[in-house]
Image: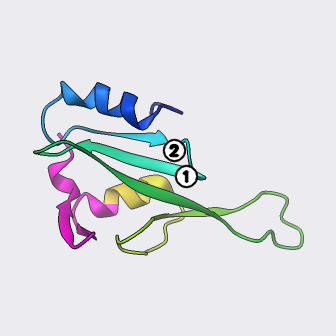
Amino acid sequence: MLGIISRSYAEHLLCSKPIGSYLIRINEKIFGYALSYHASDHCRHLLIEVILLPKRHNNRIQQHVYRFLGGAKHEIFTQLNELIEKYSVCLIIFEQKQINMMDLFI
């Protein structure tokens, strides 16, 4: 994970890398992350939303979960790495296109 970097800087980093290279970055516009990857035609970006859960009565730690935002599957994960691991072997349907995250891992 690189931290807060812009979409354009992510594209700059990925453009010289092999197709399928990816990075996870903190998104600068929403409370969440972006999975930026070098596709066959250009860089693409999938948003990962962080959802804050209501605090329980005696729980002082804010709980949160993760999911792809938009047309992708809306499964919820308690850890970001769980989302990435799951979709490293499953297809993501996003804007009526199938994305196989296994192709993103090099």
Q: CA distance from mark 1 to mark 2?
A: 6 Å
The number of numbered badges drawn on the structure is 2
Mark identifier at residue 27: 2
Of marks 1 and 2, which one's residue comes earlier in the chain? 2
Q: Which mark is residue 51?
A: none
Instruction: Tell me whether the residue at label 1 lies in contact with that at label 2, contact meaning CB atoms closer than 8 angstroms.
Output: yes
Q: Nearer the viewer, residue 36 or 95?
A: 95
Percent x, y of residue 4: 53, 33
Q: Quadrant of the N terminus?
A: top left
In the picture, measured across the screen, residue 96 lies left or right of residue 50, that is left
Residue at point 80%, 68% (across, down): 55
Is 54 colored magenta in this rendering? no
On the image, the x and y values in percent for residue 48 come to: 46, 57
Q: In this figure, which residue is indicated by the disc labeled 1?
A: 32
**Dot 1 lies on which element?**
strand
Q: Residues within 10 Å of mark 1 (few under 14, many from 20)?
A: some
Q: Position of residue 50 (x, y in %)?
A: 57, 59
Please provide percent x and percent y for residue 92: 26, 67
Decide whether residue 96 is among the magenta residues: yes
Res 43 quadrant in image = top left
Residue at figure coordinates x 46%, y 33% from the top left: 6
Q: Residue at x 57, y 52 (%)?
A: 30
Q: Which residues are magenta?
A: 86-106
